[in-house]
C-alpha cells in the first residue's frame, strides 16, 4: 500500500505546485531567500547546539545537514496548509521548492562532510581489537533451545580446562532478527529495538548458564536485525575472519534427505568451513566417533575432533574404518599420518583406529554410534555436485545415527583448525 500511494501523493503535490506564479524576478529572489533562511535556520541551529554539547565539528556538521532535509513530512504539512487556506498558492510553490532543494542537497553534502573513508576510520572497533587465533561463529535461532550448540562451540574453541593456558579463541553466538512485513512502517525501528533488547537478555542468560564459567568473557554475542539471515551470516563470517561456522539442525529436517531453509542457504553461501550439529539430549563429549572416508570434508571433521581431544582431557576418539562386501578398508592418507606424528603422546594415546567388517558402512557406523557421545562425519562427495544435499551417506547417517552428530563441510583446503592449538603453550611439545 505504501509503495502504491506514495508516488500518487508526490504526483498530487506536483500538480498543485504552480511554478508559473513565479513570473517576476523579485518573486524568484524571495524564493531564494526562503530557501537560504530554511537552510541557515536548520543547519546553523543544529551545528551550534551540537558544538555546545561537546560534539566534534565534523559530527556537528553532519547532524546539521541531516536536520536540514525536509522530505515527505514537509510536503504533507504544506498540502494541509494549502487546503485550509493558511498559505497561498504562491507561498506553497516557494515552500515546495525549498523542501525539494533541502532534501536533494542532503546526500551530496553529507557525503562531502563525512566521506566513506572517514566513516570506516571512525567506525566503532570491537572490544578486542586483536584478531583471535581461533573463532567460531554460531548462528542461534532460539537461545532457549540451543544451549548444546553453544556448549559444543566452546568445547571446540576453548575446551573445559580453565586452569590450562590456551590459545586466544572466542565463540560468537550470532542472533539475527527478521521483522515481519506486516509491521507499520513507522514502528519498525521501535519494534527492532524491543526485539534486540529481548534477544540480548536471552543470550546473556544462556551465556551465564554455560560451563566453565571462566570462559564467559570469551563468548561474545552478535545481535542485529537482518532481512536475509544466510547472506548476513556470510558477510559477518568474512568480516570477522571466522574459522568455523557451527549451525544447529533438528533431526526431522533430514526426513526428505534434502537441505532446505536457512541451514541449506548457509551451507551454500558461507565462504568458510561449516559444521552442522544434530543434537541429542546429552552434554557429554567423552567418546567421539569418526567414520573415516578419505575426502576433504572428513579431514575437517578430523581436525575438529583433535581440537576436542586437546581441549578436553577426558575425551577419547575412535577413527572407524569399515570393510564391506569386496571393499577393503580405506587407507589413511599421507596428510593423516603426518598429522598423527605432530600430535603429542597425550593426545595420540587417546586415539584408536579399529577396522571392522560389516554388510554396509552405514549400518556399521549406526551400530558404533550407540556407544558414542558425538559422531563426526564429513559431507559426502556428492556435496560438491548438488548443493541441495549433503550426499546420500551423510543424509542417511543424520536420520539413523544414535548419538549426537556433527557433519562437516570444508570450504578451503588451505585453512587449518590446528595451527594455533598445536603451538599453544598448554599443549606439550612433540618429542622425537
Image: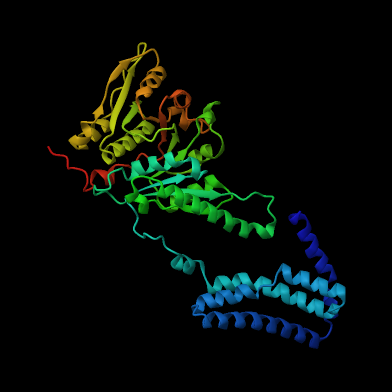
Please give the name of the residue rendered at 81% of the width and 77% of the height, measured from the top-left corner.
Answer: 92
Q: Position of residue 25 (x, y in %)?
A: 80, 87
Q: Is residue 295 above or below residue 90?
A: above
Looking at the image, which residue is at 68% across and 60% down? 186
The picture places residue 428, in percent across and down from the top left corner, at: 18, 42
Left or right for 11, reference 373: right
Q: Is residue 282 visible?
A: yes
Relative to 431, is 101 above or below?
Answer: below
Location of residue 164 in the rendering, given as x and y in whole percent from the top left corner: 24, 47
| In front of the other: 250 or 298 | 250
Q: Is residue 41 above or below residue 401?
A: below
Point out the image quarter for the C terminus.
Answer: top left
Placement of 222 over or under 211, stated as above or below:
below
Q: Residue furthest bottom?
A: 26
| Picture quadrant of residue 158 | top left
Using residue 312 as the reference point, say whether residue 280 is left or right of it: right
Q: Nearer the viewer, residue 370 or 222?
A: 370
Q: Residue furthest left?
A: 432
Q: How many marks?
A: 0
Q: Residue at x 47, y 53 (%)?
A: 222
In this view of the protein, can residue 415 be seen by the observer? no
Residue 337, image quadrant:
top left
Q: Position of residue 342 (x, y in %)?
A: 21, 37
Amino acid at each position: 500500500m505504501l509503495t502504491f500511494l506514495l508516488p500518487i501523493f508526490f504526483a498530487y503535490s506536483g500538480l498543485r505546485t504552480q511554478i508559473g506564479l513565479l513570473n517576476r524576478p523579485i518573486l524568484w529572489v524571495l524564493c531564494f531567500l526562503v530557501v537560504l533562511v530554511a537552510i541557515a535556520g536548520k543547519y546553523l541551529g543544529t551545528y551550534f547546539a551540537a558544538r555546545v554539547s561537546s560534539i566534534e565539528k565534523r559530527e556537528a556538521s553532519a547532524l546539521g545537514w541531516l536536520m536540514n532535509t525536509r522530505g515527505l513530512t514537509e510536503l504533507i504539512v504544506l498540502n494541509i496548509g494549502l487546503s485550509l487556506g493558511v498559505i497561498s498558492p504562491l507561498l506553497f510553490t516557494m515552500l515546495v521548492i525549498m523542501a525539494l532543494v533541502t532534501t536533494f542537497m542532503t546526500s551530496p553534502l553529507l557525503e562531502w562532510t563525512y566521506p566513506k573513508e572517514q566513516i570506516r576510520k571512525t567506525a566503532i572497533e570491537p572490544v578486542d581489537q586483536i584478531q583471535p587465533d581461533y573463532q567460531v561463529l554460531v548462528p542461534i535461532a532460539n537461545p532457549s533451545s540451543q544451549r548444546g550448540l553453544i556448549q559444543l562451540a566452546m568445547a571446540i574453541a576453548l575446551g573445559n580446562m580453565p586452569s590450562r593456558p590456551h590459545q586466544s579463541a572466542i565463540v560468537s553466538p550470532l542472533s539475527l532478527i527478521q521483522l515481519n512485513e506486516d509491521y507499520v512502517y513507522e514502528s519498525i525501528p521501535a519494534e527492532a529495538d524491543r526485539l534486540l533488547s529481548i534477544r540480548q537478555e536471552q543470550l546473556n542468560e544462556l551465556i551465564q548458564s554455560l560451563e566453565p564459567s571462566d570462559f564467559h568473557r570469551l563468548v561474545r554475542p552478535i545481535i542485529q536485525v537482518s532481512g536475509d539471515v544466510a547472506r548476513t551470516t556470510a558477510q559477518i563470517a568474512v568480516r570477522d575472519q571466522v574459522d568455523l561456522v557451527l549451525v544447529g539442525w533438528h533431526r526431522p529436517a533430514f526426513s526428505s534427505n534434502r537441505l532446505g531453509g536457512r541451514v541449506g542457504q548457509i551451507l551454500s553461501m558461507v565462504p568458510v568451513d561449516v559444521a552442522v550439529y544434530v543434537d541429542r539430549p546429552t552434554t557429554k563429549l567423552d567418546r567421539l566417533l569418526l567414520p573415516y572416508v578419505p575426502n576433504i570434508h572428513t579431514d575437517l571433521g578430523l581436525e575438529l575432533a583433535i581440537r576436542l581431544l586437546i581441549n578436553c582431557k577426558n575425551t577419547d576418539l575412535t577413527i572407524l574404518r569399515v570393510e564391506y562386501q569386496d571393499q577393503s578398508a580405506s587407507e589413511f592418507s599421507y596428510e593423516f599420518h603426518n598429522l598423527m606424528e605432530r600430535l603429542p603422546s597425550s593426545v595420540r594415546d587417546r586415539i584408536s583406529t579399529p577396522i571392522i567388517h560389516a554388510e554396509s558402512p552405514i549400518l556399521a557406523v549406526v551400530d558404533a554410534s550407540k556407544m558414542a557421545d558425538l559422531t563426526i562425519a564429513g559431507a559426502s562427495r556428492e556435496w560438491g555436485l548438488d548443493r541441495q544435499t549433503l550426499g546420500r551417506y551423510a543424509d542417511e547417517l543424520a536420520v539413523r545415527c544414535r548419538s549426537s552428530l556433527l557433519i562437516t563441510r570444508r570450504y578451503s583446503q588451505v585453512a587449518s583448525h590446528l595451527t594455533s592449538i598445536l603451538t599453544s603453550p598448554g599443549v606439550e611439545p612433540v618429542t622425537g
